[in-house]
Amino acid sequence: MLRKLSTNVLDLFDHYKAYYAYGRVIQLKYAGIVGFAGYPLFYFIYVYFLRQPYESLPIRLVATAGCFFLAIQNYWTPAFRKYYVHYSYFVILYCLPFFHIYMVLQNHGGMVFIADNFMAVFFLVLLTDWRNTLLMIMIGGAFAFLLYFKVAVNPAIPHDFVERLPTFLLVILGGSLFKFSERKMAEKVEQEKLEGMSIVLANIAHELRTPLASVDASAKGLQRSIPPLIDVYQTLNSQNGQSRLPPQLGLTMPAIDRIRFEVKQVNAMIDLLLINAKGGRGQNMLEQFTVGPLVRSVIESYPFESDAQRDLISLSIESDFHVRGSTYLFKSICVNLIKNGLTAMKRARKGSMSIRTLVIGNKGRLIVHDTGIGISREQMASIFKRFHSFPIGEGTGIGLAFCKDTLTQWGAKITCTSEEGVYTEFQIEFPILELGLKNAKVR
């Protein structure tokens, strides 16, 4: 029973975290600024100008201190920043439902504090999802009533407060419906955006593929033509007693290889954009392939910035297996995960990456683990959503959505676990067709 209750509470808090996953966390900062200025200000107003029957400086100072730490959001250290949203939950619970219900009880109702309660409900609806709006009102209200009946000399529930409860409920219901309609509108806008992108990108893809095909064909021609020229050059120089190849000439073939790789990468990005614009509905023919060798080939052909960066990655094929999918798209998935890991390590200025294949039961797994910057709990709920990127403005926000949609079509699934500042691990679980190598480890 307790386990089920704790699970339900965690689910509710997950909804609260998800509510702040799309940049809304800035609202908490501004709410903190308003509260930090407002709670002490209204204390002086209600004590010296609009005198009220009851006021409490300690209770207001607690609210002021709570809002102060919300307001200085930018100054939270990385070690504590991951708990900012958790902290905000308790501040909102104290400052809005608990504080204002308690104050209206102590003042025996009255238009001033009933108006304050309407303001509190408005802010609560603005700052929380509808589930936690109701939960906070129940919890905050319960503690307010308990404290009031404990400390008040002649406790009594104000009639004018009770008479306005239907209006409070209407405000809560109306605000929740407004936010629900806002979400539906956002979903509709995203769908229209996808449809528009599909048309535009199809035209862009056609225009881009033509020059890319020309570049690739020219690079192929150079790959065929330059080796014989180098042979002739070396033969002529050897006759003159010079056998050393000039450095510029020695770099020619690697440069051409890089050009062809980049052309493939641009084509892969075009395909990725088109698939995402269609909502992940790729029409690629499925084929059977072995996971381990394909992962190794991706690592070998990946354009690392340096040998030192290449050495940060280790590959361990503990057990190999065959799956059904698209080798082309699988390589794109691997490139995406490797690039994300390297970016995380670059931002953290530390770390390494391990890639493993293994079999557990009748499932094959590909595990990509890096010890870079990690992912915050608030962002974890949204990493596989299309067009979501973090930090905001970095990347297109379609890579992981593409990975998830593509793998789902193959009957596979991708999951992520992470601890901010410590590690990130992606696991891809495949339904395997056949076991391959056993206990083979490859660096």
Image (cartoon, rainbow, N blue to C red):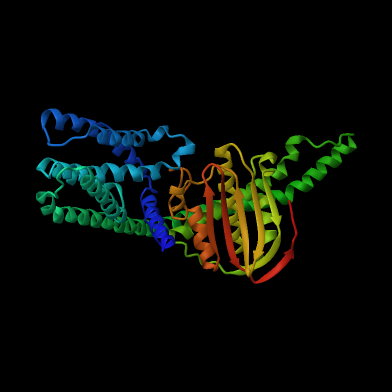
Q: Is residue 228 above or below residue 75?
A: below
Name the one closer to the observer, 131 or 347: 131
Residue 107 horizontal side relative to residue 328, left or right: left
| Residue 326 location, quadrant | bottom right
Q: Is residue 125 above or below residue 95?
A: below
Residue 165 horizontal side relative to residue 390, left or right: left
Residue 403 horizontal side relative to residue 311, left or right: left
Name the one closer to the observer, 124 or 280: 124
- Hey, which residue is sitting farthest front in the picture? 153
Q: Position of residue 388 (x, y in %)?
A: 43, 50
Q: Position of residue 27 (x, y in %)?
A: 32, 41
| Residue 334 location, quadrant | bottom right
Q: Position of residue 99 (x, y in %)?
A: 24, 42
Q: Position of residue 208 (x, y in %)?
A: 51, 52
Is residue 31 among the parts visible in the rendering? yes
Q: Is residue 251 above or below residue 276?
A: above
Residue at 44%, 53% (x, y): give it.
381
Viewport quadrant of the N terminus: bottom left
